[in-house]
């Protein structure tokens, strides 16, 4: 496995001069959809498979293959309380159907499932924040979309821990424009209480927050980063730093970077 290191001197954003620095890259042929991370490993999610890798070297140490179980489009993953939760959909089929698939990251065995059925859209990411589940559902303009709906129907939904819907929000119009014909691909709540999301292709993080009034997420700023849309991960095992993992589909790389003010 090839490992490449690169220091990015400056990725200016539109506000406050935040930078993405100290970039470490791992070449992983499965790097197409998303990455999850815990204390010692990162996990590469690629449609039907998950591969487990050492954080320091990129060495693969485990794998799960869901092809035989008709898993075709896992979009992202996150480690929460020692479990790996993956967003799974039937993209580009219609009607859209979605589920959360749960794994033991130690053994890489599938251990559970929560199905949303066809109620919301195509699930793209999941996080836990303030005692609730937060799940993003995509709609698309064109291929993979629902009849009569475009990507303006994409939304963020807040669920109780027993999966009862609590609230829901739309994405801001300027972010929908950034998505093009695609939608929100990745997202995570930051330690600062802000929401960091990605689109499908652009090397940008969009920072949002919940609104004080209304039903549309509040846009804060855009940060230029060295990852190209898709699913992202925030390494919560590193204290006092904003360490993110993402990927570049074009050259099959997992990319680690730090956001600094």
Image (tube, rainbow, N blue to C red):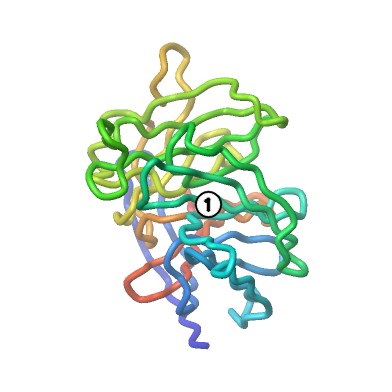
* Residue 36 shows in the view: yes
Q: How far across and how far down the image is residue 230, in percent?
A: 41, 56
Where residue 165 sits, quadrant-wise, is top right
- Given residues 54 and 141, the one toward you in this image is 141
Q: Is residue 173 above or below residue 185?
A: above
Where residue 55 sits, quadrant-wise, is bottom right
What residue is disc 1 on? Answer: 88
Identify the residue shown where x is 64% and y is 75%.
63
Q: Is residue 181 above or below residue 46?
A: above
Q: How far across and how far down the image is residue 199, in percent?
A: 35, 48
Q: Is residue 156 above or below residue 180?
A: above
Where residue 207 sits, quadrant-wise, is top left
Identify the residue shown where x is 67% and y is 56%.
84
Q: How far across and how far down the image is residue 87, in percent?
A: 54, 50
In this rendering, the count of numbered labels is 1
**Residue with the most extreme top position:** 213
Q: Alpha-carbon neighbours of circle 1 within 10 Å: few (<14), some, or many (≥20)? A: many
* Residue 131 shows in the view: no
> What SS does tag 1 mark?
strand
- Given residues 106 and 222, the one toward you in this image is 106
Instruction: Answer with left or right where residue 223 lies relative to residue 26.
Output: left
Q: Is residue 200 above or below residue 152?
A: below
Identify the residue shown where x is 59% and y is 64%.
69
Instruction: Answer with left or right where residue 60 lies relative to residue 199.
Output: right
Identify the residue shown where x is 36% and y is 44%.
94
Q: How far across and how far down the image is residue 219, in percent?
A: 36, 30
């Amino acid at each position: 496995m090839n490992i490449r290191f690169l220091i990015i001197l400056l990725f200016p954003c539109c506000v406050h001069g935040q930078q993405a620095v100290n970039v470490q890259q791992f070449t992983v042929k499965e790097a197409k959809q998303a990455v999850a991370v815990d204390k010692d490993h990162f996990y590469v999610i690629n449609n039907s498979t998950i591969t487990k890798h050492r954080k320091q070297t990129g060495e693969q140490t485990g794998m799960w293959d869901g092809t035989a179980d008709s898993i075709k489009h896992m979009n992202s993953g996150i480690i929460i309380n020692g479990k790996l939760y993956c967003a799974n959909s039937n993209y580009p089929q219609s009607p859209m159907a979605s589920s959360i698939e749960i794994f033991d990251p130690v053994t890489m065995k599938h251990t559970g499932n929560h199905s949303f059925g066809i109620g919301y859209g195509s699930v793209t990411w999941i996080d836990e924040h303030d005692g609730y589940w937060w799940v993003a559902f995509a709609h698309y303009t064109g291929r993979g979309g629902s009849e009569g709906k475009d990507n303006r129907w994409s939304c963020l939904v807040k669920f109780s821990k027993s999966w009862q819907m609590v609230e829901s929000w739309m994405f801001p119009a300027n972010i929908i424009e950034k998505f093009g014909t695609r939608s929100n691909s990745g997202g995570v709540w930051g330690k600062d209480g802000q929401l960091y999301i990605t689109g499908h292709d652009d090397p940008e993080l969009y920072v949002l927050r919940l609104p004080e009034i209304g039903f549309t997420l509040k846009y804060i700023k855009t940060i230029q980063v060295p990852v190209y849309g898709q699913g992202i991960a925030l390494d919560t095992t590193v204290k006092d730093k904003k360490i993110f993992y993402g990927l570049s589909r074009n050259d099959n790389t997992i990319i680690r970077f730090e956001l600094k003010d």
